[in-house]
Image (cartoon, rainbow, N blue to C red):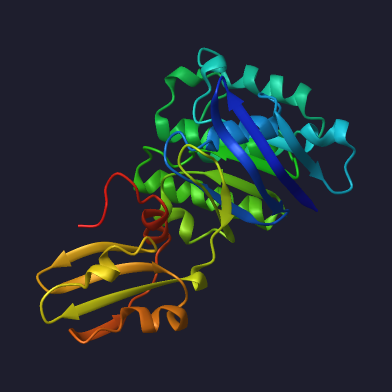
Amino acid sequence: MKLTIEKINKKFSKKIVLNNVSFSVTTGEIVALVGRNGSGKTTLLKILSGIYSKDSGEIGIEGIDNKNIRKQLIYIPDRFDYFKNSKIKKVCEFYKLAYENFDEQYFKTELEKIKLSQTSRLSELSKGQLAIFSLILGISCRTKFILLDEPLDGIDVINTKKIVDYILDAQSDGIGLLISSHQLNSLETISDKVVYLDDGVGVSEEINKDEYSKYQLVYQEKIPAELRNNPDVRIISNIGRVYVVIMKGSYDATHDIIQDKDLLQYDKLPIALEDIFLLNSKGEDENV
């Protein structure tokens, strides 16, 4: 089953937040949604969940009538402001009414595992506890898709591992997950696909590591101006005559571009998702 987002557009006043955003999420798939603050990640998740309306575009789930799409999506925000003074038991009751397949036994069992009482108020939970509780709540709704907004933001290493474990458990149960986060390193290890929202505009593209290359370059003096000024090149670091660069284009496509009479040595380096994010975010902080 596939959740399809096609040519979604959204404006607030005169500001374009999302511009023809298109991609898909399949059940059993983890899709990372990355981009700078203000790039439209939260807006997109709220449109998918029905909190915001879209200006234009289509949202669909194959095999599901349009009026029932929201029943197969659960949005987990980065904060539960509306429920912050509520007890866990009351939150559970609300979601049981909203989602007919709510798995109360799973909900209770997992709360016991993390030692949370149903009489606890959300305002009493630590940031890590609230993040884990939120994910348990989302899985308990037994929807086809879960939309997570910054589930790893400000979370310590131990709780990050617990959250990732729950995400992987949900995936193994056949749930599709769309995850907005700045924790690129944690997402990189578990994501099947990455969608990048460009800062302030909201144009998406699925990131394929094979379409990028990363090198360590050693020159007799300094990197050539042609390479430094190339818009498809980002200098990540520079120590003396040694440069580390990330480039758009496969290794085969970029091999000739890096060649120069002053190049003494080059080495191919493994590409991280964060490298690609830095390249695509290039703007105010230009190459060193």
- Relative to 64, residue 223 above or below: below
Q: Along the horizontal axis of the image, is 49 left or right of 148? A: right
Give the quadrant of residue 147. Answer: top right
**Residue name at image x 29 percent, y 62 percent:** 229
Residue 253 higher or lower than 238, as above or below: below
In the picture, residue 246 is in which quadrant?
bottom left
**Side of 34 where 57 appears, left or right:** right
Residue displayed at 42% across by 41% down = 36
Residue 207 placement (x, y as % from top left): 53, 60
Foreground residue among 96 and 262: 262
Q: Nearer the viewer, residue 8 or 32?
A: 8
Q: Who's the residue at 67% across and 58% down the image?
A: 172
Location of the C terminus by quadrant is bottom left
For residue 279, side relative to residue 288 (left or right): right
* Residue at point 50%, 51% (across, down): 164
Q: Position of residue 217 (x, y in %)?
A: 23, 78
Q: How many marks?
A: 0
Closest to the observer, 26 or 159: 26
In percent of width and height, residue 244 lies at 25, 70
